[in-house]
Image (cartoon, grey):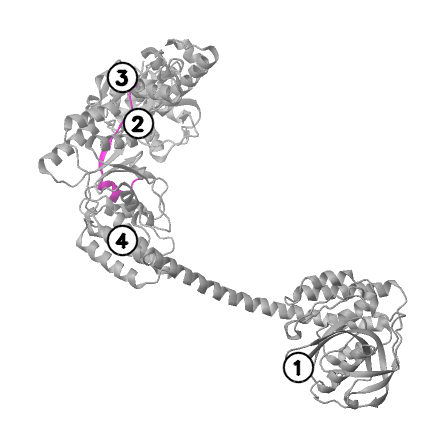
Amino acid sequence: MKEKSFYLQNEEEMDFIPIIPINEQEGDTGPEVVIPNELPLLPLRNTVLFPGVVLPITVGRDKSIKAINDAYKADKLVGVVAQKDSNVEDPTVNDLESIGTVARIVKLIKMPDGGTTVIIQGRKRFQIGTIISEDPYFKAQILLLEEETATPSEDFEAYVATIKDLAGQIIQLSPNIPTEASIILKNIENPSFLIHFVASNLNTGLAEKQQLLQLNNLQERADLLMQLLQRELQFAELKNKVTNKTKTELDKQQRDYFLQQQMKSIKEELGGDANEREVKELAKKAENKKWTAAAKEMFKKGIEKLERMHPSTPDYSVVYNHLDLMLDLPWQDYTEDSYDLKKAKKVLDKDHYGMDKVKERILEYLAVLKLKGDMKSPILCFVGPPGIGKTSLGRSIAAAIGRKYVRLSLGGLHDESEIRGHRKTYIGAMPGRLLQSIRKIKSSNPVMILDEIDKVGSDQRGDPSSALLEVLDPEQNHTFYDNYLELEYDLSKVLFIATANNLQNIQPALRDRLEIIDLNGYAVEEKMEIAKRHLVPKQKEAHGLKDFTFKIGDKVLEKIIQDYTRESGVRELDRQLASIMRYEAREYVMKDKVKAILTGKDVEKILGKPRYSNDMYKVAVMPGVAVGLAWTYVGGDILFIETSLSEGKGELKLTGNLGNVMKESASTALSYLQANAKKLDLEPDFFSTKSIHVHVPEGAVPKDGPSAGITMMCSLASALTGRKVKPFLAMTGEITLRGQVLPVGGIKEKVLAAKRAGIKEIIMCWQNEKDIESIDPGFIKGIQFHYVKTLQQVLDLALV
């Protein structure tokens, strides 16, 4: 007999016990083994033995031990039959199944407790004939049963393959079955043995196993086995699902407990709880903090609340972040101001050319601060066109007085909470941007630029400009309340400087709190100085030309300013200079040299043909055309007003995207001319036979305001009389039906625009003379001003 290999495990620990011989063909009786007609019977209580299968069993009953011992001494063959009822301790003949399996005893092992373990291998099925004896053990005549082998066919092969597949799936789902079982299963080639092997180890009832053993036809046995396997697989899947779910829940609980214990041990090793240390650190920082009594009391309550809270609660981080903000805010920490007025003036002059009015205001503030020692900061508002240096002036002011600088951009701000902060109970709540900025720079008296205050929006989320009323009122901002901080904070020492392009867009109540300082556009001479002192050196350094010596003369700079820019500020000039520097950098890299002096021809080569020209004022001299001066938020500008006559019935047609005020100015001018027709040598019925069309070019640009009144009147009078308007003459002023000329605003911007455009004479109201006197005479050199009181004076000066 060849040596056998098998897996032996306790039956209670496994669902599927794979026990297999090395040579599966030994399930058949060879010629050397002769099965006698009479055999001792061995009743089994819990299992059924199938042919070919090796099975370890523990024998405990005296009758069974005697039968095994006698058989082992003889031919080692025994008839194994299953009990109908496994609970019967001492079975009779009627308690035994009629069909069993002839087994060969492979190994007999005597156990220390007196029991016997025997390893048996099934040989052939048999049926009990006659019981010969019942004492000392059952002995019977047997009838061997022949297998009805299935004929090889595709159906049977499919049965075998399905059985292998189902058994493999059950093995995968059963964690107690060794993985080697599936490998052994795949290597069984004998279909009969495969069926017996799987049936023997199937986790099913004894009756169903016995039913499998009793079937003579192998295919029928395979069919029944497949049904049982299907049921077993479903049960295994369900069991696996339940087990995994329970295991996951247990694993999570065990994992959490294990991690908590580890965390506890780590904290003990490090010398205490990390959260306790955090709270202690907060309290330690607060000891040396200079703050108000209310802030100190709130911090104390917050610390006490934090000590009582568990770190995993959501409110813990809310309270912690609030206390952290309180510690980070400077409260009563101030930077020391520099009271050296000469040094401050020097810093301001170095950074910005001109702007004397602003510089004087800052020096006055410093002087009072030096004398009094304490003063509420003024709320300044710089108003002027873009690109003149309003924002950068704030940085220079901070440097001049020795304070920290912070900029707050208000352009497009819609939410009031950006100013006042959110309530700290909201998820993601933050303090307002004012306190965030102060927290960042660690000073309670910085220079804070509120940039683009005229572009603050408002919608359903609130009106930020209304929230700014408290911030920008010197009588209120010492008790500014932030919703997140939930405390009053003193902003009275902050020097607020707002910037705006258009005052009309600022809420009236907010505008009332601001000290308005008008910053006008630059004259050509100012732009040349700014270019020489700041822009050219900055662009040379930005383009790697700092160490190269090439000169841009005054005439060349003037040509760039007049022919390539039309602006109040210097941003476009800065871009044109950057284009020149890029060209010079390329020339040096390619030709290894830089031209020493830049000429006008070089400028045209680099920047192209001039974009703007004053020649249009020469060719525009014809009856009905007058030049006016306008103010826009980007600075001053000039505009033409054209009038033409045609046969008609006295209608007045206005085009050019004009506003209501401008249209009314045209109607007023026409009414005045009709009332004074005789002074213009016009027949009274002349107006009823002509249609008048007034047009202001650049029709896509909206235009409005009263300042074009005298220009419209001159244009109408020129067209009606056929007399030309004097060339290189511009005018601005409001008119009345009584023939009076009224003053208008934006004079400096308009005059500088006229100077840029090459205008030589300007007519305006006599009351605007004071505005002209405030302009540096050097900037308006070459312009003749005519101050008038009546429209007749305007006509006498304007019409040739």
Residues in magenta? 505-526
Q: Residue at x 17, y 26 (%)?
A: 343
**Sequence-first disc among 4 and 2:** 4
Q: Which residue is mark 4?
A: 282
Mark 2, other Cα within 10 Å: few <14 / some 14–19 / many ≥20: many
Q: Is residue 607 left or right of residue 190?
A: left
Does the CB distance between marks 1 and 4 fall below 8 Å? no
- What number is the disc on residue 19? none
Q: Amino acid at mark 3?
A: Asp
**Label 2 to label 3: alpha-carbon separation:** 38 Å
Q: Which residue is mark 3?
A: 796
**Sequence-first disc among 1 and 4:** 1
Which quadrant would the N terminus be assigned to in this image?
A: bottom right
Q: Which residue is mark 1?
A: 114
**Sequence-first disc among 2 and 3:** 2
Residue 186: x and y in percent read 76, 61
Quarter of the figure with residue 122: bottom right
Q: Amino acid at mark 2?
A: Ile
Q: Secondary structure at mark 4?
A: helix
**Label 1 to label 2: alpha-carbon separation:** 111 Å
